Image (spheres, rainbow, N blue to C red):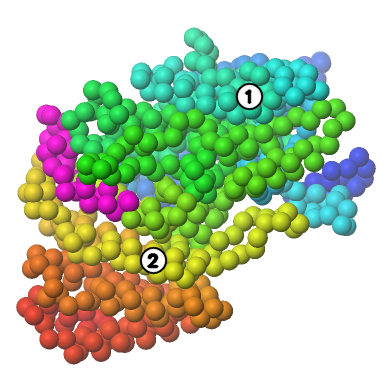
Amino acid sequence: GRILLEAKNLRYRALTDDAAEAAAVRESFATSVLWAGEIVAEGDDGRLAVDWTSLIVRDAQGVATTLSESGQGGFSLDRERSAVDLDQCLAFPENVELEAVLTFSGSKPGGEVRSTAPVPEAVTLVAHQSLLRLPEPGYAPRAYDPRMGSIAISFADYAASLAEPVERRWIVRHRLRKVDPSAERSRAVEPIVYYVDRGTPEPVRSALVEGASWWARAFDAAGFEDGFRVELLPEGAHPLDARYNVIQWVHRSTRGWSYGGGVVDPRTGERIKGHVTLGSLRVRQDRRIFEGLLGARQTGLGGPTDPVELALARVRQLAAHEVGHALGFAHNFAASSFGRASVMDYPAPLLELAADGSIDASRAYAVGVGKWDLAATKWAYLETPPGGDEGAALDAVVATALRDGMFFLGEGDARDPASAIPRASLWDNGTDPVSTLETVLAVRQRALGRFGERNLVAGEPRADLEEVLATVYLYHRFQLVAAAKALGGIDYRHALAGDGQRGIEPIAADRQRRALGLLLQAVAPEALDLPESVLRGLAPKPAEWGTSRESFASRTRPAFDALGAAATAADLVFDALFEPARAARLVDQHRRDAQLPALEEVIATVVERVFADPESLPERQREIARVVQRTLADRLMALAADRDAAPWVRSRVDTALADLLSSLDKLEPIDAGERAHATALAADLG
């Protein structure tokens, strides 16, 4: 006989005791058979012996599809070079781990494959599949609240009353109960414990333990004494044993994302096993960033300006951040706007200029969980006494957070280039991102003015200086994006009907215009012109070195392409300013309130500043000005040609480009370079 491995369709349910009603829903939607195998033998007690080989030796993760869709070549599973790894097929009390060595053969491998596989045409990977026992009854799901920033599962409940929505959302969290549920504070029946990978080297290991342990304070504040701990993974314990929530240290060929997650009971949202993955190159990149900003003379010596110590401070935050995801908390990208209030934001280093003009890194990163984390933990894990009103208790937590000026804005509010609220941004600082941009630009200018051999550790090749420069030259890039959101921007909250929160409001006109002015400072030729001392210190790379993803694109190789770098930095601004949805919002906002800047005003202001009289510039900066002009024109032409942009946006941009062409026709070039530039630009605009 055969056995089928079937996935139930839990996206459609009926939360009811009526078996017939539940069956009607279950029978209305498809399930998915994931695998079918042969029954080898059947015991008298009904137990089956099954050959699992074809389940284990298969492309369950869709590796071949991923490689193809990411442009890494056409690959397929080569079963002749794949096998079950019996030594790594493991049985634990709560889970079974099945492991195979899978080889994918293919042709025309892409760059990522070539950089990681010894023979790029044969990519051999280890693939795990886990079978976990579902937890015992007793866990109570908690309904999602869009104001509190939890990760959630969702499904349609067709047993909902006609007065209720069909869509339900339950938050993801660990099971955590008090020994004494009636007590305001009590020890936990079983605390949440996360274990740090023993393969993590010092001093990173201690930093991970310390940073992840910050959550203990949040659980203590939520009423759980000893409710959360972080320990080193016991000797001999396996990280795939579902009894252990693990913080794993992994290595990649390039720096990449870190992840916090794990396994969730799809029926309830309960976190069964937490699993955090941290990439080892991240801390090295952070060290590099601080060497670029502060210099490398203190690297490894300790103290507040040691780039290693600052990188470790970031790793502590990273550990807390990813463990926060595993605990069930989503990104809150607004938290940096009300006092660096959460480890669930993306923290930009808070650097300022001291009175003597030096860069002050004493407050680079906050320490510990923030006030938002305390509120989010209390809301997600709060346990009410028997007979207590859980809904009222949860509402009280939300009300307190709102009264204290806290709110949640997540992925959908911040990451999209079209996002509209300045207070929800990645890698930014400050209640007012526009004001913070002014500080960031000043720090960048100071760091560039001192940049040189001091930014390398003694003995490092000078050829590495270009990668360090990139972190400084583009230091302002994320704050630029945050400030640009003020243009056509709105302020809003994820409110519920009746909770008293305000509605949507446009960003004030003066803030929008101030943001535009600061953004234009960032594309001024003097802001993009690297000092001659810096340019003379950027040595070409030896043939064996090659470029990396940290290198600037170059049309002057092997020499550093200073004009290309200027174009890259300028396009950061124009890309953010002239995002199609942002442009459309400018049109609509001005229609509704004539005091708010119109798209025409924004374009005219930018063109006027960028195409200002070049005679006022030093000769070395005139070509940079032309590079910025070309970059702006290209961005506007792309917006005018974007069929997804609103017609009323494209028509206004077309008009602005026609006006620009007319001004070029009247231009009297001051030199041959300007004549060539104007001729080529006019030809493209015409």
Residue depicted at 6% across the width and 78% down the height: 672
In the image, residue 480 above or below residue 336: below
In the image, residue 542 above or below residue 570: above
Indicate the amino acid at tag 1. Asp
Q: Nearer the viewer, mark 1 or mark 2?
A: 2
Judged left or right of residue 340, residue 184 is: right
Magenta span of residues: 439-467
Judged left or right of residue 222, residue 366 is: left
Q: Where's residue 211, x and y in %?
A: 47, 26
Indicate the amino acid at tag 2. Arg
Please identify the dominant SS of the magenta region. helix
Q: Where's residue 620, x and y in %?
A: 9, 64
Residue depicted at 33% across the width and 42% down the height: 351
Q: Where's residue 25, x and y in %?
A: 83, 49
Residue depicted at 80% across the width and 55% down the height: 165
- Residue at label 1? 220
Query: Could you tell me which quadrant the C terminus lies in?
Result: bottom left
- Residue at label 2? 514
Q: Please say whether residue 609 is visible from this viewpoint.
A: yes
Q: Where's residue 331, x and y in %?
A: 54, 44
Q: Please say whether residue 122 is visible from this viewpoint.
A: no
Residue depicted at 26% across the width and 74% down the height: 609
Mark 1 burial class by Cα count in 10 Å: few <14, some 14-19, many 20+: some
Name the outermost residue toward the top: 235
Image quadrant in which you'd find residue 464: top left
Image quadrant in which you'd find residue 546: top left
The reply to whether the magenta stretch includes residue 33 is no
Q: Earlier in the sequence, mark 1 or mark 2?
A: 1
